[in-house]
Image (cartoon, grey):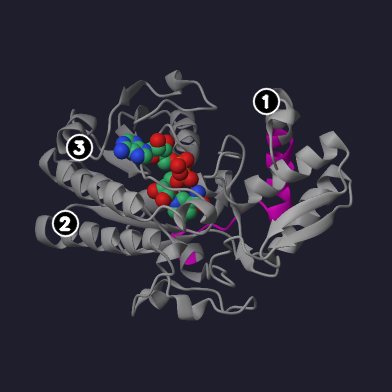
């Protein structure tokens, strides 16, 4: 047991809801905050849950009052590549407001420490132009040239928190996540990311007896994907470390999207013909994480392979698709 009081902002979302469960299992007192309740987890997993719009400064002050020791700042208007390439202004406005107001609220309420969740999307486009890329290390961030507006907001907010550290002594940690996936995450509706979308499409094909699957782009674009169980463990270790600079959290097991489809299909035990949709967004051509610094700072490495993580995630998404009714899905 510990007497520490923790705020998880964005606790209604994917990683935030897993973080709440993880922190409760360690005995912390946890306040969840979000603009919505969690979709796939009970809201009373946290000791209290505040419904607040964190774009508003007063709400950020309310969310962080009461002798808070740690804030995990997950709240963001975000989604997969389809979402962040089509929604630009709202993503930048909402996320700048949330992060500026959370930094200020943490300062004014004298919060012990705040962890900001940045992204691999901050890395420069020119380092991600071929499928066989050199893994990105933390020092690759500058000169900055993110591929999309979501990434520009993320790197701007990294600097907001760094400035609060320098000018006001706010104790800050920064994770740079590389594609987190797992159970209880969005799998339909436009905000889902590649692993969830592929699991959904394979489940629909299996349930309908289809032999084909659509894949965005030519499927040769590469990424690495990290299961949420490893993500929350690494995030917690970063929070409790002395490392004040941004740190990659992800996996260095790089695959193409075509390979991702093949792994999920083999878990289901079917073979599918890929129909490549060249006009759909696919983001940078290749991306992988260099985790050298993460392993040395955290004294820890990922526990799950991509296939391990997909073996946990796929059955959950298939059961969701089944209970939603397979006919309710277009793709
Ligand atoms: P998510 O969309 O599931 O969760 C974000 C949560 O923020 C949602 O529940 C949403 O309702 C909440 N939110 C949005 N606007 C809000 C507002 N105005 N006030 C209060 N709450 C608000 O996303 P996630 O995948 O859990 O990501 C968590 C964090 O990690 C985000 O900051 C995201 O940018 C970052 N990140 C995630 C990934 C990934 O692969 N999932 C990769 C890189 C970075």
Q: Earlier in the sequence, mark 3 or mark 1?
A: 3
Q: Earlier in the sequence, mark 2 or mark 3?
A: 3
Between marks 2 and 3, how big is the CA–CA gap? 19 Å
Q: Is residue 94 above or below residue 60?
A: below
In the rendered image, which quarter is residue 175 located in?
bottom left
Q: Which mark is residue 56?
A: 3
Q: Is residue 46 left or right of residue 226?
A: left
Res. 222 visible in picture: yes
Q: Secondary structure at mark 2?
A: helix
For the residue carrying disc 2, how many other residues have a C-alpha within 10 Å: few (<14), some (14-19), or many (20+)? some
For the residue carrying disc 1, how many other residues have a C-alpha within 10 Å: few (<14), some (14-19), or many (20+)? few
The residue carrying mark 2 is 164
Can you give x and y, in whole percent of width and height, for residue 37 in the image?
42, 25
Q: Residue at 26% across / 52% down in the picture?
A: 96
Q: Nearer the viewer, residue 6 or 44?
A: 44
The residue carrying mark 1 is 324
Q: Is residue 85 left or right of residue 255?
A: left
Q: Nearer the viewer, residue 285 or 22?
A: 285
Q: Residue at 35% across / 51% down in the picture?
A: 91
Q: Is residue 297 above or below residue 8?
A: below
Q: Which mark is residue 87?
A: none
Q: Is residue 316 magenta?
A: yes
Can you give x and y, in whole percent of width and height, for residue 169 in the image?
14, 55
The nearer-to-camera label among 2 and 3 is: 3
Between marks 3 and 1, how big is the CA–CA gap? 34 Å
Q: Is residue 88 magenta?
A: no
């Amino acid at each position: 047991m510990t007497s520490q009081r923790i705020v998880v902002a964005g606790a209604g979302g994917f990683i935030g809801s897993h973080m709440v469960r993880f922190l409760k299992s360690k005995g912390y007192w946890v306040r969840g905050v979000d603009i919505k309740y969690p979709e796939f987890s009970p809201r009373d997993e946290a000791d209290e849950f505040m419904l607040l719009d964190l774009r508003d400064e007063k709400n950020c002050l309310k969310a962080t009052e009461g002798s808070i020791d740690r804030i995990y700042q997950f709240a963001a208007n975000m989604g997969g590549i389809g979402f962040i390439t089509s929604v630009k202004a709202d993503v930048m406005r909402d996320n700048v407001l949330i992060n500026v107001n959370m930094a200020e609220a943490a300062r004014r309420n004298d919060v012990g420490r705040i962890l900001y969740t940045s992204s691999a999307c901050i890395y420069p486009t020119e380092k991600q132009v071929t499928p066989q890329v050199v893994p990105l290390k933390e020092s690759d961030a500058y000169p900055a040239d993110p591929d999309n507006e979501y990434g520009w907001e993320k790197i701007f907010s990294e600097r907001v928190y760094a400035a609060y550290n320098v000018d006001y002594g706010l104790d800050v940690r920064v994770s740079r996540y590389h594609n987190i996936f797992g159970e209880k995450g969005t799998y339909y509706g436009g905000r889902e990311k590649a692993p969830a979308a592929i699991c959904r499409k394979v489940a629909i094909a299996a349930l309908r007896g289809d032999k084909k699957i659509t894949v965005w782009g030519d499927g040769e674009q590469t990424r690495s994907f990290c299961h949420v169980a490893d993500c929350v463990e690494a995030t917690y270790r970063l929070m409790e470390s002395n490392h004040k600079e941004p740190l990659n959290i992800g996996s260095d097991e790089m695959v193409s999207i075509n390979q991702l489809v093949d792994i999920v299909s083999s878990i289901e035990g079917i073979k599918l013909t890929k129909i490549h949709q060249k006009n759909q967004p696919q983001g940078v051509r290749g991306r992988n994480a260099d985790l050298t610094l993460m392993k040395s700072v955290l004294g820890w490495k990922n526990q799950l392979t991509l296939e391990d993580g997909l073996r946990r995630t796929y059955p959950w998404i298939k059961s969701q698709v089944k209970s939603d009714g397979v006919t309710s899905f277009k793709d």
